[in-house]
Image (cartoon, grey):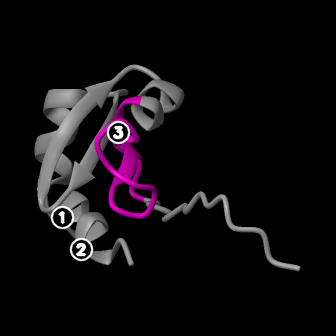
Amino acid sequence: MLDQEYNFFKNHKEEFFSKYQGKYIVIANDSVSGVYNTLEEAMKEAQKTMKIGEFLVQKCTNDDDLTMRFHSRVRFA
């Protein structure tokens, strides 16, 4: 689903960390489409032009333990 965006982040992690340390970046279609100070701001701005599931928001940290997190408005009964 967001494998392409997550792999793009992993492949450019060092570059992104040096440029955007501590920031949240929005990734879509193998490019960074925005850089924000908070997760909330990143989500709000990304949703203005894209649908949930079309982009990845990732915090730029120097942590080697990367974890994928997905947020969805879908409710399973």
Q: Secondary structure at mark 2?
A: helix
Q: Which label lies toward us, 3 or 1?
A: 3
Q: If you read the primary sequence from the N terminus, does the residue marked by circle 3 or circle 1 appear first?
A: 1
**Up-down: is 31 above or below 70?**
above
**Up-down: is 44 above or below 77?**
above
Q: Which label lies toward us, 3 or 2?
A: 3
Q: Residue at x 39, y 47 (%)?
A: 57
Residue identifier under label 2:
4
* Quadrant position of the C terminus in the picture: bottom right
First to last magenta residue range: 45-64
* Left or right: 32 in relation to 62: left
Task: Identify residue type, mark 1.
Answer: Phe
Disc 3 crowd, CA 10 A, few/some/many (<14, 14-19, 20+): many
Residue identifier under label 3:
46
Residue identifier under label 1:
8
Task: Identify residue type, mark 2.
Answer: Gln
